[in-house]
Amino acid sequence: IIVTYDEDFADARFYPLGKHHGVVRLRVWPTTTEQTQWALGRILESVPEERLQGSLIIIDNKRIRIRGGGDA
């Protein structure tokens, strides 16, 4: 699973859902170590492990969006 701030990894034309192990795209602000740890903690607490496989997960300061992993 790739964890990144790079928006290109959210482009389904280059990274089709189900064709990779999973992408977590961070959109938190500010981009500090603390905010990154907070965002990853939210994912680990609220997203079941099986939903991570092959999914695109976009997390911002307010919500978590999941594409793929059963709801593509």
Image (cartoon, rainbow, N blue to C red):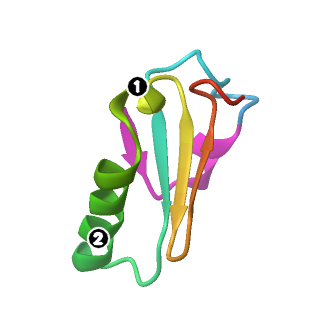
Q: Which residue is mark 2?
A: 38
In front: 31, or 68?
68
Residue pictured at 46% horizontal, 81% vertical: 29
Q: Range of the magenta residues? A: 1-11
What is the x, y in percent for residue 64? 54, 58
Residue 55, relative to residue 59: is it above or below?
above
Residue positioned 32% across, 76% down in the render: 35
Residue occupying image coordinates x 59% and y 44%:
66
Quadrant of the rendering where the N terminus is positioned = top left
- The disc at residue 62 is none
Mark 2 vs mark 1, CA separation in Å: 21 Å
- Residue 50: mark in rendering: 1
What amino acid is at disc 2?
Answer: Trp
Q: Amino acid at mark 1?
A: Glu
- Residue depth check, mark 2 versus mark 1: number of the one nearer the observer: 1
In-image side of 41 versus 51 (left or right): left
Q: Earlier in the sequence, mark 2 or mark 1?
A: 2
Residues marked 2 and 1 touching at CB (< 8 Å): no
Looking at the image, which residue is at 64% across and 24% down?
17
Q: Nearer the viewer, residue 54 or 10?
A: 54
Which SS class for mark 1? helix
* For residue 17, above or below residue 40: above
Judge whether 43 appears above or below 23 on screen. Answer: below
Image location (x, y in percent) of residue 10? 63, 44
Image quarter hosting the C terminus: top right
Q: Quadrant of residue 55?
A: top right
The residue sitting at the top extreme is 19
Residue at the far bottom in the pictured view: 30
Magenta stretch encompasses residue 9: yes
Q: Using the image as rendered, state which of residue 54 and residue 46 is in the foreground.
A: 46
Residue 5 is situated, as x and y percent measured from the top left of the image, at 47, 58
Question: How many numbered circles does the render carry?
Answer: 2
